Amino acid sequence: MEKTVVLITGCSSGIGLGLAVRLASDASCRFKVYATMRNLAKKERLLECVRGCHASTLEILQLDVTDPLSLAAAPQQVQEQRVDVLVCNAGVGLMGPLETCSYQAMKTIFDVNVFGTIGTIQAFLPGMKRRKAGKIIISSSVGALQGIPFNAVYCASKFAVEGLCESLAVILQQFNVHITLIECGPVNTSFLANLQRMDTEGCVLQGLDPQTCALYSQYLQHSQSLFRDVAQDTEEVLQVFLEAICTPCPPLRSFTTQFFMPLTRLKLTSPDGSEYVRAMHKFVFSAGEAQGDRV
């Protein structure tokens, strides 16, 4: 039986690594996985997780989604000369008051999250359209659907990807190519530890008005408690990815958690945005209330 060829970006850690391991270790050997990462020096963790059971199911490739030459070369490195499922997982975060976000930090966010995603799709979409078959799965976020305080630039990049994919989905149905956004909430990966953020004691915040500093400090406490109380295990999130990969016609959006749905629905039930703004402010900054009441 012919294997399903899956190429995944951002496999050095987190969801990308977990998904590559799960697919490459499939008991029925249904998948051939091309796990890609920018820095191949980080491949040892992936190899250790697979533990030698990958002779015919896993290849590790270097791919920098911000490098057009690297993206152009990627399709030629796939032995089967086709990719059935493309998982755009590479992404970075940025947290802090907008006034403290440097141009270079913001540019990096958009280079990876937006242009990196666009470039990756551009590299593999022509082949899918020629074959009239394929799936494109995007690691997205609750921050792609609703603005989150002190994550303005990150949310802006993810909002852009939502618009990109929603627009593509209208056209791609004509080619039997399905695009799916996996809307993740907090996940127990290294993402939070690795994202760029401003320390409340750091010199970058010096000169910022006291009220914003106080709000940011409150937000950091809220974020830490949120990850502690509601963050999902990676395995739980991977199941949603697997369903999208294995379902013949997956939906445009799949949610890994229902926790943020009350806030998300406010954007539909109150289109002018005022109810959402009030509810999000209460959710983040009203300390001492029961979590269920705050949502």
Image (cartoon, rainbow, N blue to C red):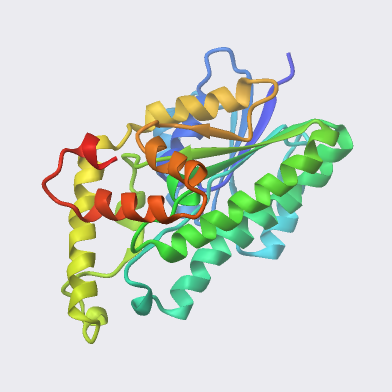
Asked if residue 109 is positioned above or below residue 29 in the image, the reply reads below
Would you identify the image quadrant in which residue 88 lies?
Answer: top right
Q: Nearer the viewer, residue 247 or 97?
A: 97
| Residue furthest to the right | 130
Q: Nearer the viewer, residue 283 or 216?
A: 283
Would you identify the image quadrant in which residue 6 lies?
Answer: top right
Q: Residue 77: x and y, percent?
A: 72, 46
Q: Is residue 56 left or right of residue 218?
A: right
Q: Residue 73: x and y, percent?
A: 73, 55
Q: Is residue 237 left or right of residue 159?
A: left
Q: Residue 213: x and y, percent?
A: 20, 73
Asked if residue 83 is positioned above or below residue 39 in the image, the reply reads above
Q: Is residue 55 left or right of residue 229?
A: right
Q: Is residue 206 left or right of residue 252?
A: left
Asked if residue 26 is positioned above or below residue 261 in the image, the reply reads above
Quadrant, the N terminus = top right
Quadrant, the C terminus = top left
Q: Which residue is at 49% across, 39% downward?
A: 183
Would you identify the image quadrant in which residue 174 lies?
Answer: top right
Q: Which residue is at 14% across, 51% downward?
A: 287
Q: Residue 238: x and y, percent?
A: 46, 29
